[in-house]
């Protein structure tokens, strides 16, 4: 079945550092890929998505590129802020099936 | 535009008690979902619905029942609560299709003693 693997956290960074959160997936077909973010005490919200190979999703300075050859969708940001502290979830969805989530990666950014 | 709302926000139950969690969405979405979130486990799908009057089991359906009598509402029931059901429950909704975004509610924190 489908699965998503994320790097374990927490990831701790200083403000303005470069961020990478790794995500790899297993799927039988051609899924759509998503990054969701969960701020403390809140529900998940979509951060970015990509629907086909080589697509790049971007939002709020975050980027991720759909790499079919390496089955990856790594999240990057050039300069993180304290306000980026949250839990980040990678997810995939094939056809009309439901979302499959990774276990989440906590990001802690200090001033 | 409220999006997805959940009631209640927090609840404490004793083992064996029953309760219903209510999810409501005002975006006219066909699909609705119930997830539970536990530390180190990510989000796991409990049940979902692809339209009014239809429901289906997800990854962890045991101990839960659901109903979708109205398009905008999706109820999650616990008939006899167990400590293993202590969790944070999230409802979500979406339109159909692989590329569509799921919109999440703020969550219900449930503690079963």
Image (cartoon, coloured by chain):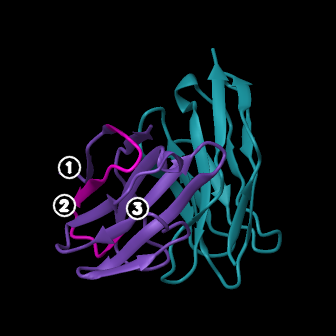
Q: CA distance from mark 1 to mark 2?
A: 7 Å
Quadrant in the picture for residue B77: bottom left
Does the magenta-highlighted stretch encompass residue B27?
Answer: yes
Labels 1 and 2 positioned on one and the same chain: yes
Local SS, label 1: loop
Spatial CA distance of label 1 from label 3 is 18 Å
What is the secondary structure assignment of the residue under circle 3? strand
Disc 1 + disc 3, Cβ < 8 Å? no
Q: Dot 2: within a 10 Å radius of its alpha carbon, few (fewer than 14), some, or many (20 or more) residues?
A: some
Residue under label 1: B2
Q: In this rendering, do the residues under marks 2 and 3 share a single chain?
A: yes
Q: Are marks 1 and 2 in contact (CB under 8 Å)?
A: yes
- Output the chain of dot 1: B
The C terminus of chain B appears in which quarter of the rendering?
top left
Task: Return the chain for callout 2.
Answer: B
> Magenta part of the protein: which range?
B11-32
Q: Quadrant of residue A52?
A: bottom right
Q: Residue B84 in magenta? A: no
Q: Which mark is residue B78?
A: none
Which residue position is annotated with label 3?
B34
> Label 2's element?
loop
Q: Which residue is mark 2?
A: B26
Mark nearer the N terminus (1 vs 2): 1
Chain A colour in the picture: cyan
- Vertical placement of B78 versus A105: above or below? below
From the top left corner, tell me how far across and down residue B2 is, in percent: 20, 49
Asked whether the viewer can see residue B89, the reply is yes
Going from N to C along the chain, the mark reached first, 1 or 3, is 1
| Residue nearest the viewer, comparing A54 with B8 | B8
In the foreground, B85 or A72? B85
């Amino acid at each position: 079945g489908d699965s998503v693997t994320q790097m374990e956290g927490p990831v701790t960074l200083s403000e303005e550092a470069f961020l990478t959160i790794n995500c790899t997936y297993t799927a039988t077909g051609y899924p759509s890929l998503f990054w969701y973010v969960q701020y403390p005490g809140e529900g998940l919200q979509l951060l970015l998505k990509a629907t086909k190979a080589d697509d790049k999703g971007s939002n709020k300075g975050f980027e991720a590129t759909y790499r079919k050859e390496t089955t990856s969708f790594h999240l990057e940001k050039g300069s993180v802020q304290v306000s980026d502290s949250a839990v980040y979830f990678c997810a995939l969805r094939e056809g009309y099936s439901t979302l499959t989530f990774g276990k989440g990666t906590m990001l802690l950014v200090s001033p | 535009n409220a999006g997805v709302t959940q009631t209640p926000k927090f609840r404490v139950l004793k083992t064996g008690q029953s309760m219903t969690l209510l999810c409501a969405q005002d975006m006219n979405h066909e699909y609705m979902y119930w997830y539970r979130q536990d530390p180190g486990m990510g989000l796991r799908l409990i049940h979902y619905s692809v339209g009014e009057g239809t429901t289906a089991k997800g990854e962890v359906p045991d101990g839960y029942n659901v109903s979708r009598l109205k398009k905008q509402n999706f109820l999650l029931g616990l008939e006899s609560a167990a400590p293993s059901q202590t969790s944070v429950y999230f409802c979500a909704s979406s339109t159909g299709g692989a590329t569509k975004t799921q919109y999440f509610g703020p969550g219900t924190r449930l503690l079963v003693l």
